[in-house]
Amino acid sequence: MKILIATDGSKNAGKAVDYGTRVAAKMGAEVLGVYVINLKSLELFALAHHDSITGYEEENAKHRREGEEALEYLASQCKQADVKCSTLIARGYPADEIIKIAEKEKPAMIVVGSLGKSNVAHMLMGSVSESIMRKAPFPVLVVRGDVEL
């Protein structure tokens, strides 16, 4: 059995990682940690720097480093909980990529954090957790706030 835990490295995603890892340990499941380099962020960067796009690759590399750090945290939580773990960095629109990966991997559930963005950020970026809940053909656990298991 496998649980897909999606992370973006944020504080709320960290709570989802912590909770999802504990659920995996209790269920005897392995974890697939996923970080998606958000093309929307890169598109917004390109729009803001249209006169000088030379920093695009640096921005892309920054996102990759953030993904590696987020997945290192997830792997350390899995190791601490004695849960088998693999990780994956994808590139695209997070909800769509997470669902594509889930369709391929067929997890027992998808675990995501809820960011609680401002109205402006929500309009620009959308809600990844909300989109996953609407589109995923698997159970989705959205972790908000501090939770105990």
Image: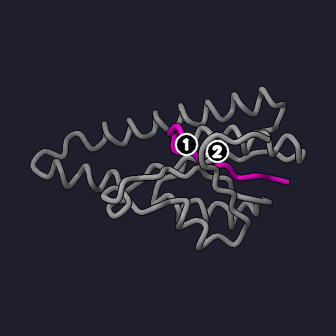
Residues packed near mark 1 inside 10 Å, few (<14), some (14 to 19) or many (20 plus): many
Residue 111, horizontal then vertical, whole percent: 67, 53
Residue 70, horizontal then vertical, whole percent: 55, 35
Which stretch appears magenta?
A: 1-11
Instruction: Please give the residue where the numbered disc 2 appears in the rendered image.
Output: 16
Q: Amino acid at mark 1?
A: Asn
Residue found 85% across the figure and 47% down from its top: 29
Element class at badge 1: helix
Residue found 38% across the figure and 37% down from its top: 61
Q: Is residue 120 left or right of residue 106?
A: left
Q: Amino acid at mark 2?
A: Ala
Residue found 13% across the figure and 45% down from its top: 52
Q: Is residue 90 left or right of residue 102?
A: left
CB of mark 1 within 8 Å of CB of mark 2?
Answer: yes
Let me know if residue 6 is in the magenta part.
yes
How are the colours assigned in the image? one colour
Distance of mark 1 from mark 2, alpha carbons?
6 Å
Residue found 31% across the figure and 36% down from its top: 58
Element class at badge 2: helix
Instruction: Please give the residue where the numbered disc 1 appears in the rendered image.
Output: 12
Residue 123 position (above or below residue 20): below
User: In the image shown, does 41 or 119 lie closer to the viewer?
Assistant: 119
Q: How many marks?
A: 2
Residues packed near mark 2 inside 10 Å, few (<14), some (14 to 19) or many (20 plus): many
Residue 101 position (above or below residue 48): below
